[in-house]
Image (tube, rainbow, N blue to C red):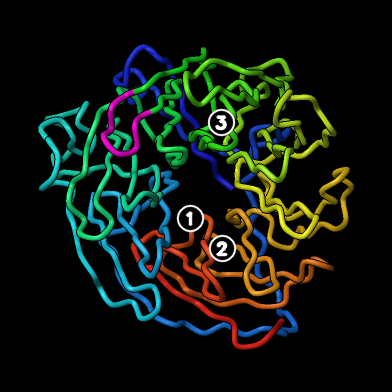
Amino acid sequence: MQVFKQLKKAASMLTVGLMTVTLSGCSIFSDDDEEIKIAPLQPINQSVAAKVKWQRSVGDGVGDYFSRLNPVVYGDTIFAADRQGRIKAFNKNNGKTIWTQDLHSLINVNEATEESWFSGIFSQTFSARISGGLVASYDKLYLGTENGDLIALEAETGELAWHTEVGNEINSDPAVGENRVVVHTTGGKVISFDAASGEQQWFYEYQTPMLSIRGSSAPTIANGGVMVGDDNGSATVLIAKNGQQAWSQRVGQPTGSTELEALADIDANPVLVGSVVYMIAYNGELAALELRSGEVRWKRDYSAFENLLVHGGRIYLTNHESHIYALNQQGGIELWSNNQMFGRKLTGPVWHDGFIALGDLEGYLHWIDPASGNIEGRYEIGGDGIYAQPIVDGNTLYTQTRDGDLVAIELTAGN
């Protein structure tokens, strides 16, 4: 598995853009320089079958770029976008196009060209560089870009509701709730905006490390607080009305003699269940924390940057080597593990029709028995691979491929 890494300084987006590097996250701690091995897919006794309900193209996709760009369902509509700024709304049941929008026609793009820091060397073809979102709420569609734009569109028509610039990359989902939109930037800023007008309300800033994994944890808004995991490996809760820190708790503990070995980012989104927040760090730990105090209920040694799934009293996770684990939610006791798909860049898991579903780098979807960890179904979509966690609405799973295909899938057998 390869993980994109970035040398980041909060001083400016220029510094961020110049310092981006790509490293291999599965081999940086190994004792040799051998090429990473990817598990070949083995024959399975397939007990569940899948069928494509509909499939549509959404522009050019995300290519080989790191991206957290994902589709989102809102009412009877599913929204999807490509990196360049093409956004489409479809009827979620039949795939019929409702509207199409291009950010190039909506916002000032004088400096929003692909690789614009190196003008004259690279092509000046416009790219909005959408990387955060999509998120739908309050009859609006919210998204962030690597250019530092936070944009709200009218969900019904695709017209621009408001647009603001935050000065740092946004490559995780905005959090929307309690009449506010909160973004977490790669420069270590957490900023709150009015969801209706886009007016800035407050910002919180922390010191970022010199070296971190490419990506940021999306905030979560709940119970008057904003939960966020930072690049230093700390889980923090901010008071939603003013941005003041309520508490901070270490989840990822930097260790080792080099900066690479000390990577401890929290890139997976916080998961709130009742009064407990679950967070996981890269090269760190999985922790269950009390929402009000930050007190640690339990910690377990797992390393991941993909989102967790908490369902039915269990926690399911994909670690940085694409091993899959199921843990007891109450104490973090491991129930089973599956390492048959190591190195396949598995997405975070989702719950689909009684199974755990994940995508991989070759464009396969896999369905896993949540009780045993056995692979019970497989379906090839292709499209240069599945890069983001699928989403599920009812009995339908929606996934987006690197080349821009949006696919709706249902199971034809299974529980």
On screen, residue 3 above or below 12: below
Q: Are marks 2 and 1 in contact (CB under 8 Å)?
A: yes
On the image, numbered disc 2 is attached to which residue? 359
C-alpha separation, residue under disc 2 versus residue under disc 1: 7 Å
Q: Position of residue 399 (x, y in %)?
A: 47, 65
Q: Nearer the viewer, mark 3 or mark 1?
A: 3
Q: Is residue 197 magenta?
A: yes
Residue for badge 1: 387
415 with respect to 143 (left or right) = right
Left or right of residue 360: residue 60: left
Q: Could you say where residue 241 lies in the image, as x and y percent from the top left?
A: 48, 23
Q: Is residue 300 magenta?
A: no
Residue 169 visible in the current orientation:
yes
The answer to which of 135 and 324 lies nearer the viewer is: 135
Secondary structure state at the residue bearing disc 3:
loop
Earlier residue among tags 3 and 1: 3
Three-letter code for the amino acid on which mark 3 is drawn: Gly
